[in-house]
Image (cartoon, rainbow, N blue to C red):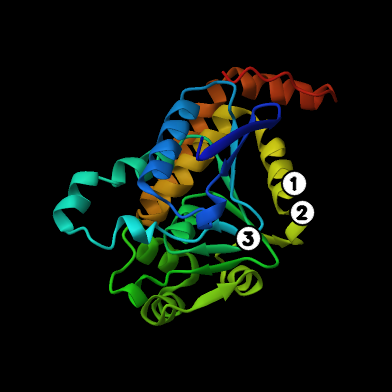
Amino acid sequence: MSLVLEERPAPYVVLLRLNRPEARNALSPELRGELRAKFLAMAEDPEVRAIVLTGDQKAFAAGADIRSMVSIGPGEMMRRNDDLNWSAIRHSPKPIIAAVNGYALGGGCELAMHADIIVAGEGATFGQPEVKLGIMPGAGGTQRLARAIGRYRAMLMLLTGSSMSAREAYEAGLVSLVTPDDDTVARAIAIATTIAAMPPLAVAEIKQVLHAGLDAPLDTALMLERRAAYLLFDSEDKREAMTAFLEKRKPVLSGR
């Protein structure tokens, strides 16, 4: 049985649905391996321009699979080299929209934070409770959370293992928008469909420059932005989109 179900709900849009409902979509090694394979394939697929990642109504992903971790030591953790799985998502050139319902805890919260946009259902819960198990986040939880909501809110959550509701996460800056639970996936697909209709090279450059610039000095980040903006002036889609705008028609985009 596939642990990651793939659908094509709209042109150039892929919906990936985590499929371990019996374990609240806990991120087992096998599930992370499937996600890696999917993201590596989609990175090379010209028919994919936006990705929606979701779980089910009860859980986006309720963390790592504790059963697979309780009896192992650091050597086994190093041999698993789990960063290869996370890297495939982290370095995806395609925009990722996380549609979060239910629990997004531990590795599930880290998975959501690998997305570029997070759409949360009203009943969603976000948290990094690893400290309660005597461990800590290991897939970017400390770093991404602090960058999203600030050092002091992040420290409170990380050191106490406390969680945030969807509304609290939105107000803190962790979530892009909050929807009724039944609308979460549909809203994420609608956003992905809008993005997929944009010139792909411009979308890719915006994503790359924003992420690279966040960790660079402002002058360096502005230079990266200028160079990327100038390069796009040589794309076929730029010429077509501007011509279509002037001619008051819909552009025909090639992705070149």
Mark found first going from the N terminus, 3 or 2? 3
Q: In the image, 7: left or right of 143?
A: right
* Nearest to the observer: residue 4 or residue 148: 4
Q: Position of residue 155 (x, y in %)?
A: 39, 78
Q: Are marks 3 and 2 in contact (CB under 8 Å)?
A: no
Marks 3, 2: nearer the viewer: 3
Q: CA distance from mark 2 to mark 1?
A: 5 Å
Q: Residue at x 29, y 58 (%)?
A: 69
Q: Which residue is mark 3?
A: 58
- Looking at the picture, tell me which residue is in the foreground, 33 or 70: 70
Q: Nearer the viewer, residue 134 or 203?
A: 134
Q: Amino acid at mark 1?
A: Ala
In 3D space, how far apart are the residues under numbered discs 1 and 3 (Cα atoms)? Answer: 16 Å
Badge number at residue 183: 2
Any part of residue 180 in sight: yes
| Image quadrant where one finds the C terminus | top right
Q: Is residue 79 left or right of residue 147?
A: left
C-alpha span from label 3 to label 2? 14 Å
x 39%, y 75%: residue: 158
Amino acid type of the residue tagged 3 in the rendering: Lys
User: Which one is in front, 150 or 193?
Assistant: 193
Going from N to C along the chain, the mark reached first, 1 or 3, is 3
The nearer-to-camera label among 1 and 3 is: 3
Q: Which residue is mark 1?
A: 186
Q: Position of residue 173 (x, y in %)?
A: 57, 67
- In the rendered view, tell whether residue 143 sits above or below residue 250: below
Disc 3 residue crowd, few under 14, some 14–19, many 20+, Cα 10 Å: some
Image height check: is 193 above or below 133?
above
Q: Label 2's element?
A: helix
Q: What residue sits 55% from the left and 20% below the top?
A: 46
Secondary structure state at the residue bearing disc 1: helix
